[in-house]
Amino acid sequence: MKEIKRYYTINTEPEFVYNALTKKRMLEIWTGEDVVMELEPNTEFSLWGGSITGVNLEFEKNKKIVQEWFFEADEKSIVTIKIHPHKKGSSVELVHTNIPDEAYGNISDGWDEDYFGAVIEMFI
């Protein structure tokens, strides 16, 4: 199992980053796909039409999101996203733990290109 720790700078205030990562309509705008998302702990979520699924564990408004992501064979990993004010808008700290070895490359690229790449692009 592997872990990813990354930092991203996004050109908007933490409130807007948080909304982009938690509000169903905002998620659908930057993913371009159907999304299932509720802003409540212990609710299931689904991104990119079911390509990513899991359970929302914790929300701290405008500051933190914790999710459990599901992989094949009942493997689960934890994603923690912390959002901080930054002179250029927001700094986002991503920690993704317990990633299956065979999924690491795809997950790593996905965070940079599909996930935060798209969010950063939305706020340029």
Image (cartoon, grey):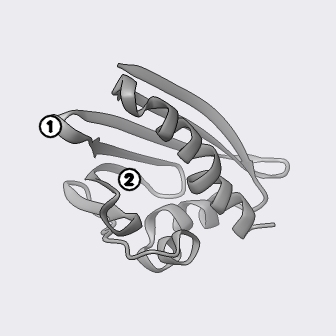
Quadrant where the image shows the N terminus: top left
Residue 13's image quarter?
A: bottom right
27 left or right of 91? Answer: left
Query: Residue 74 got which mark?
Result: 1
Q: Amino acid at mark 2?
A: Phe
Extreme-left residue of the structure: 74
Q: Earlier in the sequence, mark 1 or mark 2?
A: 2
Quadrant where the image shows the C terminus: bottom right
Q: Is residue 54 above or below residue 27?
A: above
1 left or right of 25? Answer: left
Q: Is residue 12 above or below residue 63?
A: below
Q: CA distance from mark 1 to mark 2?
A: 24 Å
Element marked by disc 2? strand
Query: Residue 102 got which mark?
Result: none
Residue 97 percent location from the top left of the image = 39, 27
Query: Residue 59 got which mark?
Result: 2
Q: Is residue 54 above or below residue 119?
A: above
52 left or right of 23? Answer: left
Residue drawn where x is 48% and y is 39% of the image = 107
Residue 115 percent location from the top left of the image = 56, 54
Residue 93's image quarter?
A: top right
Residue drawn where x is 54% and y is 57% of the image = 62
Q: Is residue 116 above or below residue 75?
A: below
Q: Amino acid at mark 1?
A: Asp
Residue 60 percent location from the top left of the image = 43, 51
